[in-house]
Amino acid sequence: MRAKTAFSTAFLATIFIAFLANAVPYFLTRRAYQRDGQEVAGFPFLFRKVGGDCGVSACDSYGFHVLHFAADAGLALACALFAGYIALRWARRVRARA
């Protein structure tokens, strides 16, 4: 049971960290497009970008890249599974020593 709990805890913690890593750029640049900046979301791949350097005009852009979003989600899932696997191995090794 401890191995399952260790996997679940590491998996969920890594997913939460990945969520924060993707959300922090958005919160730091929120509404930046209103001041000649760009509002972005995503880490390590920017999957959402709003704004431009022209102010409120036709040159403002909105971009949402599905492939970048999928890559971010896939990378987060892979990291979470790897962290869960490491925690699982660690929990089994500690249990075997006891």
Image (spheres, rainbow, N blue to C red):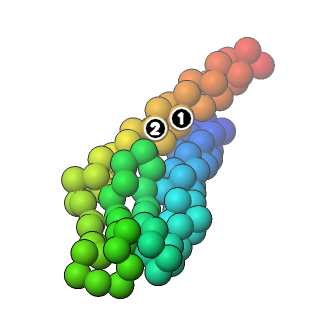
Where residue 87 appears, x then y in whole percent? 60, 32
60 relative position to 90: left or right: left
Q: Is residue 71 above or below residue 48?
A: above
Q: Residue at x 29, y 84 (%)?
A: 57
Please, is residue 75 above or below residue 12 in the view?
A: above
Across the whole image, how many numbered discs are drawn on residues?
2
Q: Is residue 45 visible in the rendered structure shown here?
A: yes
- Give the numbered dot on residue 60: none
Give x and y (percent) for residue 47: 33, 58
Is residue 31 or residue 3 the one in the foreground?
31
Secondary element at tag 2: helix
Is label 2 or label 1 in front? 2
Residue 79's disc is: 2
Residue hosting label 1? 83
Q: Which residue type carries mark 2?
A: Cys
Spatial CA span between label 2 and label 1: 6 Å
Crowd tier of the residue under label 2, counting other residues whose Cα lies within 10 Å: few below 14, some 14–19, many 20 or above:
some
Compared to 56, does 66 lie above or below?
Answer: above
